[in-house]
């Protein structure tokens, strides 16, 4: 840093010296007045192309050529120093980083995605289609031209470090999804995240059931085993192909409505529907949708719940319907 400062001082000194030589040279070699000498020096050194205030003699022309060459050299030296100063101080990176921090600070109840490999990219694409606010943490460089989104921020860094999680806004985040390939890293992130934000919902990837248990003990709310899910899916294609095809049909994504299945929480329901029974909700008549599942506050799932089951705080309902029916449901509950 001190070396660059010295170079900047040297460049400024050379420019001042150039002006001094130019003014004295035009005054004594060409007989210009001091004002005209200053004028000629400035337009020559800056190469703006204005005309001479009075005709130059041969010595004055040679002096002008030399002055222009020296000014070009000084400008080139100055530009090189400025470039070095900008790169060493990472000014552009700092500007981008500041913008990113400001964007994250505006997020609230957002999702943090740790890891942007094959699994992470799949998760991100799904979240993006729902316009979810996401902060992606990845150590490797990411081609932002392919994944840039107004709802997402890409943060380069190691998600196992607390300062990176804090920078990603973990204090205000609602969910942390961990998709790193190393179980040890995933476990470490779960421990750190649970300490930084005890209330955050954590979903982690794991490679086997033993690691799954450890991640649960560490504080993960849900643990996904991609290889196990993939294997079970392949077996289901053999044993129950029509059922699998039906489930695939349910997950098809429409242009406006993302799925034919919708999960509605107690908080999503308008106040007038709180503590009402499924019968009192009357969703079948209002929207055409059918409630096929219920999750009670304890986290237990009930398939085809009793019509007298009430929607209480901490509970969710799973609704099945066609695209237009789901759209009516979203409009009824004012869900984006």
Image (cartoon, grey):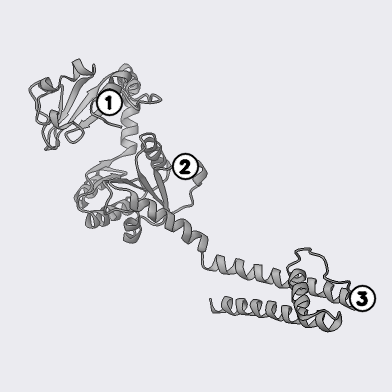
Q: Which residue is mark 3?
A: 58
Query: Could you tell me which secondary element the residue under label 1 belongs to?
Result: helix
Task: Find residue 316 and report its horizontal and vertical position in percent.
Answer: 17, 32
- Sooner in the amino-acid sequence: mark 3 or mark 1: 3
- Sooner in the amino-acid sequence: mark 3 or mark 2: 3
- Viewer-proximal residue, 29 or 196? 29
- Sooner in the amino-acid sequence: mark 1 or mark 2: 2
**Furthest residue in direction left, as rendered:** 308
Q: Which residue is mark 2?
A: 147
Q: Which residue does the image show at 84% across and 72% down from the upper left? A: 65
Q: Which residue does the image show at 80% across and 80% down from the upper left? A: 33
Q: Which residue is mark 1?
A: 331
From the viewer's perspective, is the residue at label 3 or at label 1 nearer?
Answer: 3
From the viewer's perspective, is the residue at label 1 or at label 2 nearer?
Answer: 1
- Viewer-proximal residue, 55 or 129? 55
Q: Which residue does the image show at 25% across and 21% down from the upper left? A: 320
Q: Local crowd at mark 1 within 10 Å, few (<14), some, or many (≥20)?
A: few
- Viewer-proximal residue, 24 or 102? 24
Residue 60 left/right relative to 237: right
């Amino acid at each position: 840093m001190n070396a660059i400062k010295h170079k900047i001082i040297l460049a400024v000194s050379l420019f001042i010296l150039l002006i001094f030589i130019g003014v004295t040279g035009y005054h004594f070699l060409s007989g210009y007045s001091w004002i005209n000498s200053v004028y000629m020096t400035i337009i020559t050194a800056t190469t703006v192309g204005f005309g001479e205030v009075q005709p130059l003699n041969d010595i004055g022309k040679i002096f002008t050529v030399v002055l222009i060459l020296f000014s070009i050299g000084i400008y080139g030296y100055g530009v090189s120093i400025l470039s070095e100063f900008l790169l060493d101080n990472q000014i552009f990176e700092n500007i981008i980083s500041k913008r990113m921090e400001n964007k994250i600070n505006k997020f609230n109840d957002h999702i943090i995605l740790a890891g942007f490999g094959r699994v992470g990219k799949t998760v991100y694409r799904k979240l993006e289609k729902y316009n979810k606010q996401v902060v992606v943490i990845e150590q490797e460089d990411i081609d932002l031209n392919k994944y840039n989104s107004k709802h997402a921020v890409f943060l380069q860094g190691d998600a196992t470090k607390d300062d990176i999680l804090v920078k990603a806004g973990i204090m205000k985040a609602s969910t942390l999804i961990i998709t790193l390939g190393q179980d040890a890293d995933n476990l470490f992130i779960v421990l750190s995240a649970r300490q930084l934000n005890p209330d955050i919902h954590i979903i982690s990837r794991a490679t086997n059931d033993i690691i799954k248990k450890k991640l649960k003990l560490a504080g993960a709310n849900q643990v996904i085993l991609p290889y196990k899910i993939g294997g079970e899916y392949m077996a289901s294609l053999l044993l129950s192909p029509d059922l699998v095809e039906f489930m695939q049909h349910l997950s098809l994504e429409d242009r406006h409505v993302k799925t034919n299945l919708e999960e509605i929480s107690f908080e999503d329901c308008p106040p007038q529907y709180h503590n009402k029974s499924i019968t009192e909700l009357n969703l079948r008549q209002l929207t055409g949708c059918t409630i096929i599942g219920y999750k009670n506050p304890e986290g237990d799932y009930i398939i085809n719940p009793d019509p007298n089951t009430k929607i209480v705080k901490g509970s969710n309902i799973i609704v099945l319907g066609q695209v237009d029916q789901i759209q009516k449901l979203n409009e009824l509950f004012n869900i984006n």
